[in-house]
Amino acid sequence: MKIAAWGHPYSEFPEGQDSPDDFKRKFEWWGSCGIERYIPFVSASGTAYYASNRLTVDRDLLALIVPAAREVGMEVHPILGLGPMGAGSDERLYKVDVERHGITDDDVPSWAKGWTCPSSEENRADAEAEAREVAENYEIQGIHLDHVRYPNTSQINTYPCECKACCEAREPWLGHGVLTEEDLAMPGAIYREIQHRNACVRDIAERSRRVADDHGLVMSMAARAWYLVSAAAEGQDWPRWCEDGLLDFICPMNYNLSDDIFKKLIDDDVRLVGHTKTALYPGVGRS
């Protein structure tokens, strides 16, 4: 069994506690715990924690992470993606017309309001550019995708995105841009909507795979658990990606405090990808 750990270096190494010695001590400790792969967030809401020419740079934490990890034989797989991590203009974010739906702005979760929509080709190109920028400038071992999907089904099942790109994509097959309650009652309309989401999200995965291959890197992803309830409807058909060889290892986010539910999710993971060449790292955490 191998152990990998997701990390938030901007909070693990706050200002004033981010010297090379601070990193050295922390990575020595993590290494003694058996961690072999460190998977850090290196951007958030348009802010970079690496030397970026595209995003606003806070601190170049990745430049300190890489040598500290190397000293203890630990791999580094920076997290890249969309969702609340991405940057872009308002028209490229998840959108819902609260007045038309008879709800208030407070009814829309804060995380959904700032979600970078995968339907936008510009957003998908940004994700690829970020991956390429990190891969070209740091001695990392892999690229790890996260938030590469549409907002949670708890939001989009009732309020599908109404951004410009989503509406334009629906026009040819729906005849109008915004999905109505009547549309959402038609299985065919739901099928076409989910089909579109999966095409857009897979495009990000394929772009990232090309970057990884160009630089001899491993590619992996933090995947949504509950495949049929959440992942597939949010455009993240990760079992198919594993079958098609897009991912070298997969980390389903099976966070649950119930042993029975946690076991069920792992059983699901094994059934979905156990026959592929993709290594499985079940995610452990609180939820």
Image (tube, helix red, strand yellow):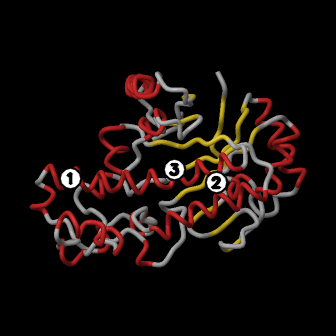
Mark 1 crowdedness (10 Å alpha carbons): few <14, some 14-19, many ≥20 = some
- Dot 2 falls on a residue whose secondary structure is loop
Rounded to the nearest angstrom, the CA distance separating label 2 from label 3 is 17 Å
Residue where numbered disc 2 is placed: 41
Residue at 65% from the left image edge and 35% from the top image edge: 4
Residue 185: name its quadrant: bottom left
Q: Which x, y percent locates residue 87?
A: 54, 70
In the depicted structure, whether residue 162 falls above or below residue 257: below
Q: Which of marks 1 and 2 is nearer the N terminus?
A: 2
Residue at image x 43%, y 42%? 224
Q: Are marks 2 and 3 in contact (CB under 8 Å)?
A: no
Element type at mark 3: helix
The N terminus: image quadrant: top right
Category of crowding for the residue at label 2, using alpha-carbon neighbours closer than 10 angstroms: few (below 14), some (14–19), many (at least 20): many
Amino acid type shown at disc 1: Ile
Which residue has dot 1 on it?
Answer: 190
Residue 205 disc label: 3
Mark 2 or mark 3, which has the lower sequence index? Answer: 2
